[in-house]
Image (cartoon, helix red, strand yellow):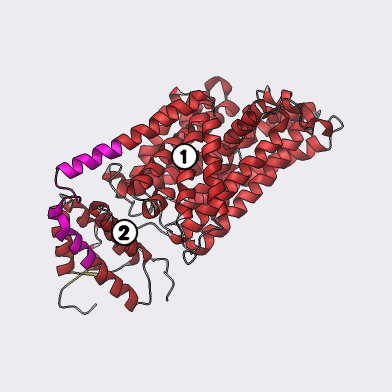
């Protein structure tokens, strides 16, 4: 059996990111959010059990990372759990995962933008936040490679600042290790709530999985990049949390407006405070940069399947990025940054992202041994942990978060019912359309096999047809043909066009790269 090769494509995204780039994008997403935005509220919830909450969040994050890495190796296209849920659990669960991710991480983008404003210019927080969103959207628009280079510089600055904070605090005569002891202020509910807040800080490794179409050798790179980024982040968080606790104690840390700045002051190093403020802003910028990148890629995948407006599925011919999706995401985030506050957006984001990873773990559970499934206990712990942390969050977060998920499910049901009423793929009259799609898939499989390739994405197309998702199957078939440069005879193209027309979906077939069309007489 031949391994599936990463395509060299002109119709899809460009694979330009290596292992170090993927790790840096993950670090840029994670480092900053927890240290500069979540540690104080988490200490307020967990009390002296803050380090236990950090460990609990890390365990859940590790399970999620392992499940995501195995799934990303199996399905190395953009979209993350939106794709995994669709392929392993069904179209609805993939849609719900994508909905939770886009909604939750859009809130995360707003939270990070507001954090930038709070550190750079507290009196003009919202204006600075909007400016940051506009600037970073422009960076992403011109190409992911430039984003990766800028993220690398951002991570270097943030790590240098955090190391300086940790060294200064731990070498200070004011540090007291007795403040690390766990007292009676720690409760199970508080630990779970704190872990849910801290999970917000770990969730950045998803950005690596959603870049599946832009990473070189994704089957090897993604499973390596995710645990590396997660391990580095955990080490940094633990070191800084210990430093802050030994200087401020859990009560002081919980009530600090700027926890790391206050810790540095308590250590008698006032000279370091400006650097910490700059580090906080740079960390938030790094997170915002990678967050916009990831949300736009999931938006791209959902638009391809018409769960979001199909116009958002366009890829820029020069820069190789989903430019319309990035502009749409940037516009929504800018509005949120101008009208919301940090604490509300963090809580809302945590709930949505935990729901997203719950579906990822359920998807990983269905992998077979041949497909590289993780140890069975890993997705079980991940799924249970996500549910526990999500519903341990404050009611002010759980209630609206649940309402948004229900709204997303209702929109999916409405779209499905309208599709059926207008003669969608669940109608018997479309059985011939399904046959046409299968015939074209079989032809493309033979062509791929002749080149020594196995294109698993074609198996996914057949799975969609079998599950009455013929429209989505056509979209994925066209995308796969473009991405893997699989030619079609004119008769096959006409057959696919006829199938799409019966589904009132003919416009999708026009997305095929014209260079792939061959005369019926040509030997291909």
Q: Whole-percent x and y of residue 168?
A: 79, 36
Q: Is residue 105 left or right of residue 414?
A: right
**Location of the C terminus (image quadrant):** bottom left
Q: Whole-percent x and y of residue 223?
A: 54, 58
Label 1: how many residues lie within 10 Å, few (<14), some (14-19) or many (20+)?
many
Q: Quadrant of residue 334?
A: top left
**Residue for point 72% across, 25% down:** 185
Q: Which secondary structure, mark 1?
A: helix
Find out whether the residues at labels 2 and 1 contact each other: C-beta distance under 8 Å.
no
- The overriding secondary structure of the stretch rendered in magenta is helix
Q: Which mark is residue 126?
A: none
Residue that sits furthest to the top in the current view:
123
Q: Which residue is mark 2?
A: 463
Residue 433 in the image: above or below residue 25: below
Q: Which mark is residue 355?
A: 1
Name which of mark 2 and mark 1 comes first in the sequence: 1
Q: 155 or 450: nearer the eye?
A: 450
Q: Is residue 369 left or right of residue 181?
A: left
**Magenta residues?**
411-439
- Give the spatial CA distance, label 2 vs label 1: 24 Å
Residue 200 in the image: above or below residue 469: above
**Residue for point 58% across, 45% down:** 61
């Amino acid at each position: 059996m031949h391994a599936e090769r990463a395509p060299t494509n002109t119709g899809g995204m460009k694979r330009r990111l290596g292992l170090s780039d993927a790790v840096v994008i993950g670090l840029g997403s994670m480092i900053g959010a927890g240290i500069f935005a979540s540690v104080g509220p988490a200490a307020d919830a967990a009390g002296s059990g803050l380090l236990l909450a950090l460990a609990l969040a890390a365990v859940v994050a590790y399970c999620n990372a392992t499940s995501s890495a195995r799934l990303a190796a199996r399905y190395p296209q953009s979209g993350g759990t939106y794709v995994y849920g669709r392929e392993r659990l069904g179209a609805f669960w993939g849609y719900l995962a994508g909905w939770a991710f886009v909604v939750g991480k859009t809130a995360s983008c707003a939270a990070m933008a507001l954090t930038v404003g709070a550190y750079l210019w507290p009196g003009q927080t919202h204006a600075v936040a909007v400016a940051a969103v506009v600037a970073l959207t422009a960076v992403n628009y011109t190409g992911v490679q430039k984003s990766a280079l800028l993220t690398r510089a951002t991570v270097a600055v943030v790590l240098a600042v955090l190391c300086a904070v940790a060294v200064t605090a731990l070498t200070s005569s004011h540090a007291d290790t007795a403040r690390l002891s766990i007292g009676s202020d720690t409760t199970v509910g508080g630990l779970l709530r704190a872990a849910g807040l801290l999970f917000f800080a770990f969730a950045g490794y998803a950005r690596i999985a959603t870049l599946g179409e832009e990473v070189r050798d994704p089957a090897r790179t993604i499973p390596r990049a995710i645990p590396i980024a997660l391990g580095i982040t955990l080490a940094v968080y633990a070191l800084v949390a210990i430093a802050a606790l030994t200087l401020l104690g859990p009560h002081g840390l919980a009530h600090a407006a700027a926890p790391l700045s206050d810790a540095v002051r308590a250590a008698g190093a006032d000279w370091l405070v400006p650097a910490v403020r700059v580090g906080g802003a740079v960390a938030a910028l790094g997170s915002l940069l990678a967050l916009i990148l990831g949300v736009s890629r999931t938006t791209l995948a959902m638009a391809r399947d018409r769960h979001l407006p199909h116009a958002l599925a366009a890829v820029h011919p020069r820069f190789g990025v989903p430019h319309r999706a990035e502009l749409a995401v940037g516009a929504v985030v800018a509005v949120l940054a101008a009208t919301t506050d940090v604490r509300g957006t963090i809580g809302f984001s945590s709930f949505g992202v935990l729901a997203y990873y719950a579906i990822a773990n359920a998807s990983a559970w269905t992998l077979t041994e041949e497909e590289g499934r993780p140890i069975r206990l890993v997705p079980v712990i991940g799924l249970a942990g996500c549910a526990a942390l999500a519903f341990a969050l404050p009611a002010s977060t759980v209630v609206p978060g649940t309402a948004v998920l229900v709204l997303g499910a209702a929109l999916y049901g409405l779209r499905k019912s309208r599709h059926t009423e207008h003669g969608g793929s669940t109608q018997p009259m479309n059985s011939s359309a399904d046959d046409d799609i299968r015939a074209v898939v079989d032809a493309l499989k033979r062509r791929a096999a002749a080149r020594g390739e196995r294109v698993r994405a074609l198996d996914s197309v057949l799975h969609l047809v079998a599950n009455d998702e013929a429209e989505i199957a056509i979209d994925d078939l066209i995308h796969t043909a473009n991405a893997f440069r699989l030619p079609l005879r004119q008769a096959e193209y006409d057959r696919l066009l006829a199938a799409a027309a019966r589904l009132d979906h003919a416009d999708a077939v026009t997305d095929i790269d014209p260079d792939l069309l061959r005369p019926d007489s040509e030997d291909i």
